[in-house]
Image (spheres, rainbow, N blue to C red):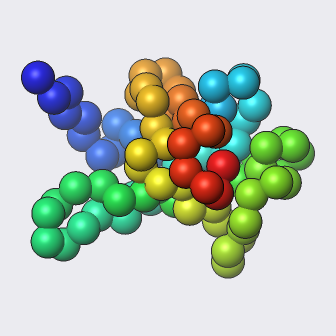
Amino acid sequence: MQKYTLARALAGKKLITTEGEELGRLIDVNISEASGRIESIIVEPNLESGASKRLKIEDGYIVVPYSSITAVGDFIIVDRRVGSSL
């Protein structure tokens, strides 16, 4: 069974890597028009974080592939090993 979460409940959540490093906070999502599935999330980076410094920042934001997300709760957990940008 797939768990559904309202988009407004995700807004502003912090992203943490599986190693415990804070990437930043979620500000938007990219959704496929054809399938309606989330393709990636847009993150405002924590510029003091070593993890954020290693990632490509475009227009002040980080784009994280949705396939990198392992869990959503109080934080959004991102597996750095999934996706070439992490």
Q: Is residue 79 above or below residue 1?
A: below
Q: Is residue 15 visible?
A: no
Query: Horizontally, is 28 left or right of 31 in the view?
Result: right
- Quadrant of the frame with the N terminus: top left
Residue 19: image quadrant is top right
Q: Nearer the viewer, residue 64 or 14?
A: 64
Q: Is residue 75 left or right of residue 11?
A: right
Percent of width and height locating residue 2: 16, 29
Task: Please state the horizontal and vertical placement of residue 76, each as a whole percent of the image.
Answer: 50, 32
Residue in view at x 72 percent, y 67 percent: 57
Residue 23, x across and y down, in percent: 70, 43
Residue found at x 72% / y 23%: 20
| Name of the residue lying farthest toward the bottom | 59
Q: Quadrant of residue 48?
A: top right
Q: Is residue 82 above or below residue 61?
A: above
Q: Which quadrant would residue 84 be assigned to in this image?
A: bottom right
72 vs 31, left or right, is: right
Give the residue displayed 48% in from the left and 54% down from the top: 65
How many numbered marks have been drawn onto this rendered protein structure?
Answer: 0
Q: Position of residue 26 (x, y in %)?
A: 53, 48
For the point 67% across and 74% down, the residue is 58
Question: Can the viewer see residue 9 in this picture?
Answer: yes
The answer to whether 47 appears left or right of 66 in the picture is: right
